[in-house]
Image: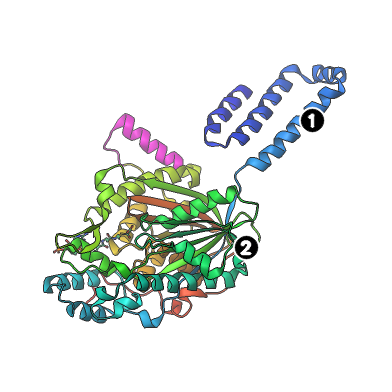
């Protein structure tokens, strides 16, 4: 029996860290040896042993335990997060958006009619915001590098100010800084702008993830978690997730490139991570990254390019929903075994065997992820994305409420949408200690990244981006808005 246990341990050890494996295997082998010799033989051998042997017998396990404790991966905690509170001055009701568009000679009557239809179907509301440059008539003429920098400063600095005030962490206590912003990549970089503004330390480890799409916020969290493993215990990592909209107003006639004009809106968030549990509000349990970019269709489905007339924009393929579905399938296949209870895993295994052995037409069992998570934050990328995930994961209207309301209030704010959604759930007072949250991000590449968090301490009050409007939510969002 012990041999079987040992064999099982060896199999399981493939997914464990080397230090855990060594200590566990050594302890199991010692146990097997002790059981084999029996208690009397063991006592007589101990009495014959020399002091040096006894010393080694005690010292080695103790040393191995210390080594294990030192080398095991450290837990990563979310100290807190803050979303950019969009100012009323940046609000862009549909009427203003379309009036501005009509005054642009580059946009045809047909393009404007198409954008009107999209706005009505998009699931975004009348309170979303665009950066200051997009409020000028003849928008694209004002979309300069300076204006884009100003947008980043407005969003990132406001979110960081809120986060530092909330956590009481001083700028000089930040050891790692990661910014993810896909489409704006100036020199000096966005991280340099933050370092300069907050006078951060010269030995800070800083990096900017660009071109990584809307799911890069979770890439940044994973990267911060990895860097924290090699930083002193209790170090702080600041992650800033945003998309700078200013330089990305498209003025051509390609429908697939007009879609981003209607969906993407100003927004951003800052999150502080640490390996110290002191004052932490969430613990990062798992982070799974799936990249399907090896397939050409997945690689090209969110693509920055120039149209035939030389107008630059982002082309969103109509295939995006299918590609997102495949990426999600791969991601949940990796996440499932880590989070699902045994009963769900058994049902999945039985359906898998039935399909393989009995009949391929047996419907595959989709595990019920509601048994593993109390809350879901699905990237507010567009109404169709939320609809599709709700259907595929069998989620209730309340479970996708945070995503739909975030899309309605803020639009598609790229990677920061997940933080607005977490903020919504907390502002509604639905988060409890011990609750599990699943964040699922999608983005260019094509990527599906997801993170599982456990709440240690819910927010005490509904401050932040939802503070002044949460009492009005949820709102009813019709499939097609009629004016
Ligand atoms: C755009 C929608 C709101 C439209 O909603 P509906 O389902 O009501 O309507 P629909 O699908 O019939 O589309 C309405 C009209 O728009 C056209 N249409 C829709 N999607 C299109 C596309 N990608 N390219 C070109 N045309 C498109 C349809 O053909 C149709 O025109 P006609 O009737 O003439 O045939 C929805 O499809 C949606 O949410 N799509 C997903 C948006 C998306 O790709 N989000 C991800 C952003 S990327 C991201 O977030 C990550 C990242 O950037 O990294």
Provide the residue designation for mark 2.
173
Residue beneath the point at 39% across and 46% down? 290
Q: Position of residue 92 (x, y in %)?
A: 31, 79
Residue 58: assigned label: 1
Which circle's residue, 1 or 2, is located before the other in the chain? 1
Q: Where is residue 80, by image quadrant?
A: bottom right
Residue beneath the point at 24% across and 62% down? 313
Secondary structure at badge 2 equals helix
- Viewed as shown, does residue 138 lie left or right of 467? left
Please tell me how many numbered marks the rendered image carries.
2
Residue beneath the point at 74% across and 35% down? 63
Q: Is residue 483 visible?
A: no
Secondary structure at badge 1 equals helix
Label 2 neighbourhood size at 10 Å, few (<14), some (14-19), many (20+)?
few
Residue 113: assigned label: none
- Viewed as shown, does residue 140 lie left or right of 190? left
Against 327, residue 280 (above or below) is below
Depth order, front residue of 177/407: 177
Report the magenta stretch's main SS: helix
Q: Where is residue 370, by image quadrant?
A: bottom left
Q: Position of residue 208 (x, y in %)?
A: 44, 57
Depth order, front residue of 280/460: 280
Q: CA distance from mark 1 to mark 2?
A: 40 Å
- Viewed as shown, does residue 67 lie left or right of 143? right
Q: Quadrant of the C terminus?
A: bottom left
Asked if the stretch drawn in magenta spans residue 358, the answer is yes
Span colored in magenta: 345-363
Contact check, label 1 and label 2, Cβ < 8 Å: no
Q: Position of residue 110 (x, y in %)?
A: 12, 71
Against 449, residue 197 (above or below) is below
């Amino acid at each position: 029996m012990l041999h079987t246990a040992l064999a099982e341990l060896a199999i399981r050890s493939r997914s464990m860290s080397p230090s855990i494996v060594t200590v566990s295997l050594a302890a199991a082998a010692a146990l097997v040896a002790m059981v084999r010799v029996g208690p009397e033989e063991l006592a007589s051998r101990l009495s014959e042993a020399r002091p040096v042997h006894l010393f080694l017998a005690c010292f080695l396990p103790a040393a191995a335990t210390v080594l294990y404790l030192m080398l095991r991966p450290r837990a990563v905690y979310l100290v807190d997060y803050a979303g950019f509170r969009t100012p009323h001055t940046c609000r862009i009701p549909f009427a203003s958006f379309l009036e501005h568009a009509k005054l642009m000679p580059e946009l045809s009557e047909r393009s404007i009619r198409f954008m009107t239809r999209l706005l009505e179907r998009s699931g975004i509301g009348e309170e979303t915001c665009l950066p200051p440059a997009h409020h000028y008539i003849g928008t694209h003429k004002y979309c300069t590098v300076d204006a884009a920098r100003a947008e980043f400063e407005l969003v990132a600095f406001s979110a960081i100010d809120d986060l530092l005030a909330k956590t009481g962490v001083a700028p000089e206590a930040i050891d790692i800084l990661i910014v993810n912003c896909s489409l704006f990549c100036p020199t000096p970089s966005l991280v340099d702008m933050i370092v300069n503004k907050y006078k951060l330390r010269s030995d800070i480890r800083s990096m900017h993830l660009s071109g990584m799409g809307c799911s890069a916020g979770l890439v940044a969290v994973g990267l911060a978690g990895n860097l924290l493993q090699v930083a002193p215990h209790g170090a702080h990592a600041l992650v800033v997730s945003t998309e700078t909209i200013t330089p990305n107003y498209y003025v051509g006639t390609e429908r697939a490139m007009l879609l981003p004009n209607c969906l993407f809106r100003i927004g951003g968030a800052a999150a502080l991570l640490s390996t110290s549990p002191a004052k932490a509000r969430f613990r990062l349990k798992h982070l799974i990254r799936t990249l399907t970019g090896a397939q050409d269709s997945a690689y090209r489905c969110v693509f920055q390019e120039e149209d035939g007339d030389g107008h630059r924009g982002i082309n969103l393929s109509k295939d995006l929903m299918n590609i997102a579905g495949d990426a999600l399938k791969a991601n949940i296949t990796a996440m499932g075994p880590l989070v699902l209870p045994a009963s769900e895993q058994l049902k999945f295994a039985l359906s898998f065997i039935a399909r393989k052995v009995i009949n391929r037409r047996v419907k595959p069992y989709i595990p019920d992820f509601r048994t593993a998570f109390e809350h879901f934050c699905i990237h507010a990328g567009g109404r169709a994305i939320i609809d599709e995930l709700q259907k595929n994961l069998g989620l209730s209207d309340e479970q996708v409420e945070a995503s739909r309301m975030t899309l309605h209030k803020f639009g598609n704010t790229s990677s920061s949408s997940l933080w607005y959604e977490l903020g919504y759930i907390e502002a509604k007072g639905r988060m409890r200690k011990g609750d599990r949250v699943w964040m699922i991000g999608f983005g260019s590449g094509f990527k599906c990244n997801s993170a599982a968090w456990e709440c240690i301490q819910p927010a005490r009050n509904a401050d932040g981006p939802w503070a002044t409007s949460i009492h009005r939510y949820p709102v009813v969002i019709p499939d097609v808005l009629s004016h």
